[in-house]
Amino acid sequence: MFEIGFWELALIGVVAMIVVGPERLPGLARTAGLWLGKARRMVAEVKAEVDRELHLEEIKQSLREQGHLAEINDIKKDLTHRVKEIQEDLQAEFDDPGPPPGWRPGAVSAPPPPDRKLPALNSPAVEAISTPVSLQKPAPSESSTPPAAN
């Protein structure tokens, strides 16, 4: 800290012995040690306080960021809830479409189209459709040939 070597310390001790005297020098050394210890403790406390403040500031910044994240999560939940409501409304609309557009109470509408059912697979109509048709020309018969010229 002060970079005081042995010779500098010895010179300070000799000057202190001359100025204070040998009787009061041990008390002065003890008092100087106490003051030096208090100064060191005070510097350590200030350093610890600064470290705590810096750490506290980091925690505050982290909490602020988490607060922003909480706001974003709240917005996300709200949007998800609204999308779900819209999906439910659309599903309800498709499940129960209600009257068609242009429908008026008491208006006569065309009769519903007849129910058309597909014929069974083993019915004669299906068999007639499924029989292959030959694409060859029919063999000439007597009725289809022109009469011979005499």
Image: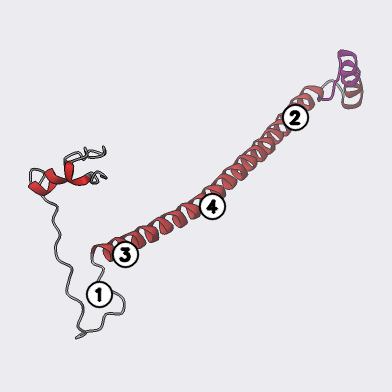
Comes first in the chain, label 3 or label 4: 4
Real-space Cα distance between discs 4 and 1? 47 Å
Residue at the disc numbered 1: 99
Residue at the disc numbered 4: 68
Comes first in the chain, label 4 or label 1: 4
The amino acid marked with disc number 4 is His
* Disc 4, SS: helix
For the residues labelled 4 and 2, say whether their Cβ atoms are less than 8 Å apart.
Answer: no
What is the span of residues highlighted in magenta in the rendered image? Answer: 1-14
Residue at the disc numbered 3: 89
Residue 35: give its label. Answer: none
- Name the outermost residue toward the bottom: 106
In the rendered view of the protein, which quadrant contains the N terminus? top right
Real-space Cα distance between discs 2 and 3? 79 Å
The residue lying at 61 percent from left, 39 percent from top is 55
For the residues labelled 4 and 1, say whether their Cβ atoms are less than 8 Å apart.
Answer: no
Residue at the disc numbered 2: 36
In front: mark 2 or mark 3? 3
Q: Position of residue 32 (x, y in %)?
A: 77, 28
Real-space Cα distance between discs 1 and 3? 16 Å
The amino acid marked with disc number 1 is Pro
Residue 17, quarter of picture: top right
Colour setup of the view: secondary structure
- Mark 2 is surrounded, within 10 Å at the Cα level, by few (under 14), some (14 to 19) or many (20 or more) other residues, namely few
Residue 103, quarter of picture: bottom left
- Mark 4 is surrounded, within 10 Å at the Cα level, by few (under 14), some (14 to 19) or many (20 or more) other residues, namely few
- Mark 1 is surrounded, within 10 Å at the Cα level, by few (under 14), some (14 to 19) or many (20 or more) other residues, namely few
